[in-house]
C-alpha cells in the first residue's frame, strides 16, 4: 500500500470531507474514528468512488488507551496527518460536571499525543512530514457560550505554535486551520442559518491546499470564514 495520510475523526463532518477530497486526489488513507462499521463503510466508499486504498483504525482518541492503541498501530507509517478529532459543547464552566478534562481529552490530547508520536517516528527516520491540525476560530478568543471548548482549543493553538518552532529545524510542518462555524452534526439541535456556515468541503479544500503546497511554501495558520457570516 502507498504511504497513507492519516485522518482522525474521519467518518463524519470535516474529517469525512477531507477523506473524500484526499481520496479523490488519489492519496492512500489511514482512517480513524470510534465506530468500526462506519470506518469500513467509508473505506468501501472511497475505494468504489476513487479506487483509493485505505486502512481503518478504530480507536477512541479521547482516552489514553485509544491514543496508545493508534500510536502502536502504524503500518505503514503515515507521512502526513489531518488531526481533526474534537468535540463541541456549549454551557457554562459551572455546569461542567467533570470540569475541563473531557474537553481537553477530545480537543487537545487527541491531537497532541498523535502528533508527538508521528513527529518522533518521522525524526528517527528523517521524514519531513506534514501535520494539519483542525483547530477552531474559537481558539482565538474566549467564547462565553462555549468556554470549555474555547479554552481547550486555545491550549491546542498555543501548544501548536510552540511545537512549530521546535520542529522547524527538522523540516516537519505543522499547520493549524481555524474554521469558523461549519455545517456538520456538531450543530444538530441548534438554531442557525445554514447559509452563514462554512461547508465541510470548504475546510477540506483548504486541507488539500496545505498538503499540496509546493516545497518551500509553508502554511502555519489559516483562518476560514464564510464571506457573509456574523457567526463565529
Ligand atoms: N463544526 C464546526 O462548526 C466546527 C468549527 C470549527 C472547528 N471545528 C472542529 O472541526 C473538527 C471536526 O468537527 P466536526 O463538526 O466535523 O465533527 P463531527 O461532524 O461531529 O464528526 C466527528 C468525527 O470524529 C469522530 N470522533 C468523535 N469523537 C472521537 C473520538 N473520541 N475518537 C475518535 N474519533 C472520534 C466521529 O466518529 P465516531 O463517532 O464513530 O467516533 C466522527 O467521524 C473538531 O476538531 C471541531 O472542533 C468544527
Image: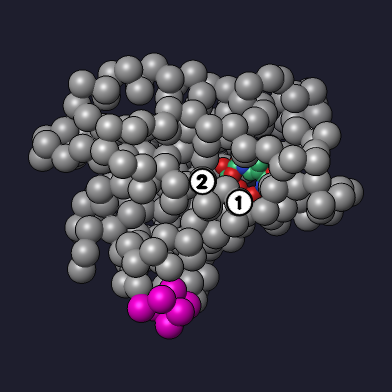
Circle 1: element type: helix
Circle 2: element type: helix
Query: Which residue matches tag 1?
Result: 202
Is 45 a magenta residue?
yes
Residue 41 in the image: x percent, y percent?
A: 49, 76
Q: Is residue 213 visible?
A: yes
Q: Quarter-wise, where is residue 178 in the image?
A: top right
> Where 193 sits versus 157, above or below?
below
Residue 166 in the image: x percent, y percent?
A: 28, 19
Residue 221 in the image: x percent, y percent?
A: 49, 29
> Where 219 sits versus 1, above or below?
above
Q: Quarter-wise, where is residue 121 in the image?
A: top left
Residue at the bottom extreme? 48
Asked whether mark 1 and ligand 1 are closer than 8 Å, the reply comes as no
| Applied colour scheme | one colour
In the shown orientation, is residue 148 left or right of residue 50? right
Query: Which residue matches tag 2?
Result: 206
> Where 15 sits versus 37, above or below?
above
Magenta highlight range: 44-51
Residue 137 in the image: x percent, y percent?
A: 65, 30
**Disc count in the image?**
2
Amino acid at each position: 500500500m502507498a504511504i497513507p495520510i492519516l485522518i482522525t475523526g474521519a467518518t463524519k463532518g470535516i474529517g469525512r470531507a477531507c477523506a473524500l477530497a484526499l481520496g479523490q486526489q488519489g492519496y492512500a488513507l489511514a482512517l480513524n474514528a470510534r465506530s468500526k462499521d462506519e470506518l469500513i463503510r467509508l473505506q468501501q466508499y472511497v475505494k468504489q468512488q476513487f479506487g483509493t486504498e485505505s486502512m481503518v483504525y478504530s480507536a477512541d482518541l479521547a482516552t489514553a488507551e485509544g491514543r496508545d492503541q493508534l500510536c502502536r498501530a502504524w503500518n505503514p507509517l503515515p507521512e502526513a496527518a489531518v488531526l481533526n478529532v474534537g468535540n463541541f459543547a456549549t454551557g457554562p464552566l459551572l455546569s461542567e460536571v467533570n470540569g475541563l478534562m473531557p474537553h481537553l481529552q477530545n480537543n487537545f490530547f487527541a491531537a497532541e499525543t498523535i502528533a508527538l508520536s508521528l513527529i518522533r517516528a518521522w525524526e528517527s527516520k528523517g521524514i519531513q512530514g506534514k501535520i494539519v491540525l483542525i483547530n477552531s476560530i474559537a481558539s482565538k478568543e474566549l467564547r462565553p457560550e462555549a468556554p470549555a471548548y474555547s479554552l481547550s482549543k486555545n491550549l491546542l493553538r498555543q501548544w501548536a505554535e510552540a511545537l512549530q518552532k521546535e520542529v522547524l529545524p527538522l523540516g516537519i510542518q505543522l499547520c493549524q486551520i481555524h474554521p469558523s462555524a461549519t455545517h456538520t452534526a456538531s450543530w444538530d439541535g441548534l438554531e442557525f442559518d445554514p447559509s452563514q456556515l462554512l461547508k465541510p468541503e470548504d475546510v477540506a479544500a483548504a486541507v488539500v491546499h496545505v498538503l499540496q503546497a509546493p516545497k518551500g511554501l509553508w502554511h502555519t495558520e489559516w483562518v476560514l470564514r464564510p464571506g457573509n457570516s456574523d457567526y463565529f
